[in-house]
Image (spheres, rainbow, N blue to C red):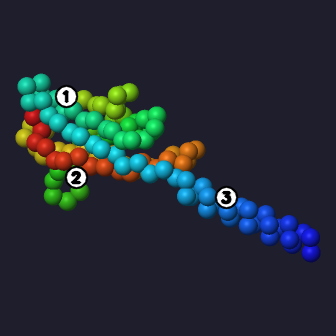
Amino acid sequence: MRSTAALLSTAIALAGVSVASAETTHVYPVTLTISVDRQARQIDVSVSSDAPAQFCETSMIRIRRAMPGKDKVIARSFPNDLGEWHLKAPPALRGKRIYAEVSGYRLPERPVECLGARSRTVTAP
């Protein structure tokens, strides 16, 4: 009888811990901005969020070409420490419609979840 009561109290305590940890997960939206510098033929992307310690600003950025069907990934990289990324536009992209995106993810060791984001579509220089 004692072992059943101890097992039941342990199960209740563990259930309470899992519920409590799910409630404390912090979800942060990500803002993704893309711009083009036509003179320098450069694409600039910046990532920002309200998450502490740049958790969400270090997400991998993908530049995609907007096209019918599945959009093609043109480039991918991690931003610098300021949450920015710059790319010299290849001649093949001139005049094409492009956008930037980051995937959402959850940090397994911390109760932080970063939401995915997509920038507006711009014309490559």
Point out which mark residue 71 bears. 2
Q: State if disc 2 and disc 3 touch (CB < 8 Å).
A: no
Query: Given the image, on which type of amino acid does mark 1 rest?
Result: Lys
**Vertical side of 41 occupied by 74: above or below:** below
**Vertical side of 38 occupied by 3: above or below:** below
Q: Residue at x 31, y 49 (%)?
A: 117
Q: Please indicate whether residue 113 sits to the left or right of residue 15 in the image.
A: left
Q: State if disc 1 and disc 2 touch (CB < 8 Å).
A: no
Residue sitting farthest toward the right: 1
How far apart marks 3 and 2 lie (CA) works out to: 42 Å
Q: Position of residue 47 (x, y in %)?
A: 31, 38
- Residue indicated by mark 1: 88
- Residue indicated by mark 3: 17
N-terminal of the pair, mark 3 or mark 1, is: 3
Count of numbered circles in the view = 3
Q: Residue at x 12, y 24 (%)?
A: 40
Query: Given the image, on which type of amino acid does mark 2 rest?
Result: Asp
